[in-house]
Image: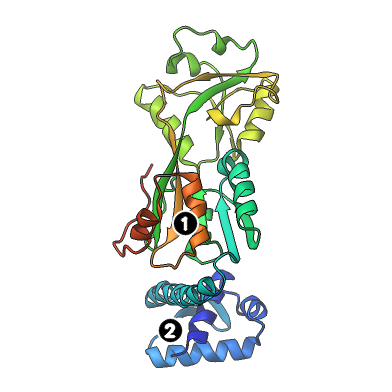
Amino acid sequence: MKLQQLKYVVEVCRQNNHFSAAAETLHTSQPGLSRQIQLLEAELGFAIFQRNRNRILGLTEPGRRIVEIAQRVIIDIDSLKSVQEDFAAQTEGNLTIATTHTPARYVLPDIVQHFARRYPQVKIGLRQGNPTQVCAMVDDGSADIAIGSETSQQFHNLAMLPCLQLARSIVARKNHPILKARPLTLEQIAKYPIITHDPSFSGRWRVMDAFKKRGLAPDFMFGIVDADVSKAYVERDLGIAILPSMAIDSKRDVNLRARDIGHLFPPSTIYVTLRKIGYLPRYVFDFIKALSPALTADVVQAAVNSRKTAGSPGGR
């Protein structure tokens, strides 16, 4: 059994079971890649991939377990290399951050700017997606950390640490009746079309659950994935929106107004997500602490070193 064979298997999965795409990514030949996977299957005594003639249908049940183990092995090997590189150059390296829109737009710019000044030789990469997608990027090793809200999907190899609480506000076009409603209640809000997040975002679950518990069924519109797009539709008076309060800038959003709704909805929690047992260079600890002073190096390292199986911090 060779590390190269495990890398081949993992890459085939990343490429949606396409051997040719995996071979191209790994700069090898498709016949050579196929041969190495066949040798691994022969050594294990079972098939990793379900096949129908020359077509790969997916993973077998034992194949899924092999991929999970292979991913951990590859990450641990990369961690060993990172230790060597970190001690060789404490202020050099790469930091790929997978994040959802709200942190990317409203939280990270100042932090990234400060970090880049402190660590000019660390190459920063930003990748964006929904909460499940950004966690998946960390899980498969294509990102170092994820920053976003909770996800209903479980990731057993990841540690999720709460770092920020985002208060919510009702956002409407100026002079909209909801801005003058006294008191501001769920019943008042439910009278108007509500522009919501995509279902993959936990903020939408929380909002919908609050109305459901009161027996209300508002008119939820669209399934928008970021606050800026939501504001564009609100500005055109197509509805109101429930957004993180920090998304409203009075200087830029001159046609919009916001009202705090902390008494109706709990704040949204943003998490930092990392791979368990992964090695973290010192500059990663500094970046995370900039997000939340409570996330000291000891706190983060303890979470990363935990092998206890855990999924998402919450569900629907």
For the N terminus, the quadrant is bottom left
Report the residue at 58% width, 45% height from top: 111
User: Residue 52 location, x and y as percent?
Assistant: 52, 80
- Quadrant assignment, res 105: top right
Q: Is residue 51 visible?
A: no
Distance between mark 1 and mark 2 Cα atoms: 41 Å
Q: Is residue 221 left or right of residue 43?
A: right
Check the image and tell me how it is coloured.
rainbow
For the C terminus, the quadrant is top left
**What's the residue type where badge 2 is placed?**
Ala
Residues packed near mark 1 inside 10 Å, few (<14), some (14 to 19) or many (20 plus): some
Report the residue at 39% width, 27% height from top: 210
Q: Mark on residue 47?
A: 2
Q: Label 1 belongs to which residue?
A: 285
| Towards the viewer: 245 or 284 | 284
User: Residue 297 location, x and y as percent?
Assistant: 40, 56
Q: Is residue 86 visible?
A: yes
| Towards the viewer: 130 or 84 | 84
Q: Earlier in the sequence, mark 1 or mark 2?
A: 2
Report the residue at 63% width, 81% height from top: 23
User: Residue 19 location, x and y as percent?
Assistant: 60, 79
Q: Is residue 28 left or right of residue 43?
A: right
SS category of the residue bearing label 1? helix
Q: Mark on residue 253?
A: none
**What's the residue type where badge 1 is placed?**
Phe
- Quadrant assignment, res 172: top right
Report the residue at 64% width, 52% height from top: 117
SS category of the residue bearing label 2? loop
User: Residue 154 location, x and y as percent?
Assistant: 39, 56
